[in-house]
Amino acid sequence: MKNLVAYITTGYPDLELTIDLALSLAESGVDTLELGIPFSDPVADGPVIEKANLHSLQNGFKIDHLFAASRQIAPKIDTLWMGYFNPFYHKGMDLFIDEAVHSSVSGFIIPDLPLEEARPYKEMVKAKNLALIDFVAPTDSSERIEELVSDADKFIYLVAYAGITGSGKSESLERVIDDIRNVTKTPVYVGFGVDENTAQEKAQGVDGVIVGSAFVKILLDESLSGSKKIEKISRLAKEIKEKINP
């Protein structure tokens, strides 16, 4: 059974909907939830997630809101915090680790933290039985991939193409997947550009897919009520889970 990871932006349109949506996704085939930490300059994300980040910040999002929501969400569905390094640095990694343990969050995804800078933080995270997810891109050499995934935990985030999330590009990943498989048994999940139309194809040869922009687009649809957004996103999650497990 291939796994489905779903990204949603914490606090957009509000914290209550974030919690209700997360719990609905837990019942809709989602295996792991990425709770996105709103940030003003999400460099790896496309315009859809960037817009949701901005709206959440404008609505008054604070890191304490992430912690409060996670206490209600993480005991019900495997949860990771996805965010850029700036908030972790300014608030302190110790704080995030302690709060993750307290709320049953299983780890972190920090896309702008390169391997060399991540190492001391990874030791801190591992000491508390948490995961710091490693990224591999199609541009990485075989030697670099071995370095990147040598001590990977939980799963490896395989970026489907060089660029930003949600742009729907396509690149051959066979060589990269083979290189990863040659050095680790850690599951490989592919992200960037995964939606109901591409999920089945992108799931080939990997253990799961990561979907973000396709869900956040629905969150941004102001013609829908909160309950309709939850219903539509949950239905889409079920559809994608079925498509990657035909």
Image (cartoon, rainbow, N blue to C red):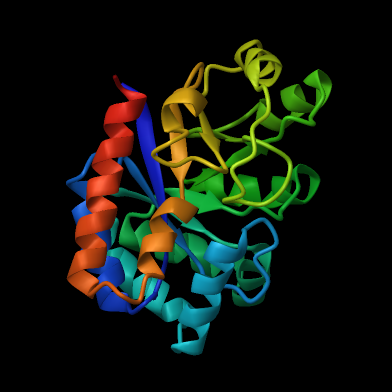
The quarter of the displayed image where residue 87 is located: bottom right
Left or right of residue 230, residue 173 in this image = right
Question: Does residue 170 appear in the picture of this structure?
Answer: yes
| 95 versus 80 height, above or below | below
- How many dots with numbers? 0
The quarter of the displayed image where residue 227 is located: bottom left
Residue sitting nearer the eye, 57 or 193 = 193
Residue 217 lies, in percent from the top left, at: 43, 61
| 49 versus 189 height, above or below | below
Residue sitting nearer the eye, 118 or 10 = 10
Residue 101 lies, in percent from the top left, at: 39, 57
Residue 103 lies, in percent from the top left, at: 32, 61
Which residue is at 59% across, 73% downward? 39
Residue sitting nearer the eye, 215 or 17 = 215
Question: Does residue 187 appear in the picture of this structure?
Answer: no
Residue sitting nearer the eye, 220 or 185 = 220
Left or right of residue 246, residue 50 in this image = right
Query: Which residue reaches farthest front?
Result: 223
Which residue is at 76% across, 48% downward? 114
| 173 versus 93 height, above or below | above
Location of the C terminus (image quadrant): top left
Which residue is at 79% across, 29% downward? 140
Which residue is at 34% across, 62% downward? 102
Location of the N terminus (image quadrant): top left
